Image (cartoon, rainbow, N blue to C red):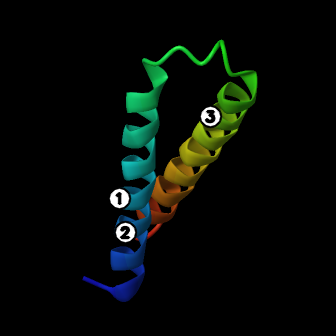
Amino acid sequence: MTPERESALEACAEALKELTILRKIEGKDLGYMPHVGSAWFKRKEAAWTAAMTAIERLDGLK
C-alpha cells in the first residue's frame, strides 16, 4: 500500500469516527442549549465535508 493511499484511508477512518461520535449526540435534545446545537451542526457539516474529501482523495488513488 502506498503512503498516499494509507494517508487517505486514515483520513476516511478519522472522519467516520467523528461522524459516529456526532451520531451518538444526535439523539439528545439540543433544543434547550441553542449554542450547543449550533456548534454540533457546524461540527457535523465539517465532518461530512472531511469524509467526502477523504473518499474523493481515496477514489483518485485507484
Mark found first going from the N terminus, 2 or 3: 2
Residue 28: mark in rendering: none
Q: Position of residue 34 (x, y in %)?
A: 73, 22
The kind of secondary structure element at disc 2 is helix
* Residue at the left extreme of this rendering: 1
Label 3 SS: helix
Q: Which residue is mark 3?
A: 40
Q: Are dots 2 and 3 in contact, CB under 8 Å?
A: no
Judge whether 56 appears above or below 47 on screen.
Answer: below
Residue, far bottom: 3
Q: Nearer the viewer, residue 52 or 31?
A: 31
Q: Is residue 59 left or right of residue 47?
A: left
Residue at image position (45%, 53%) is 15
Q: Is residue 52 above or below residue 26?
A: below
Residue that carries the numbered disc 2 in the rendered image: 10
Identified by mark 3, the residue type is Trp
Seen as rendered, the residue at the extreme front is 32
Q: Quadrant of the N terminus?
A: bottom left
Q: Position of residue 52 (x, y in %)?
A: 53, 48
Q: CA distance from mark 2 to mark 1?
A: 5 Å
Residue under pointer 1:
13
Look at the numbered discs 2 and 1 and tell me whether their residues touch, using CB distance below 8 Å.
Answer: yes
- Viewer-proximal residue, 43 or 59? 43
Snapshot quadrant of residue 11: bottom left
Q: Residue at x 41, y 30 (%)?
A: 23
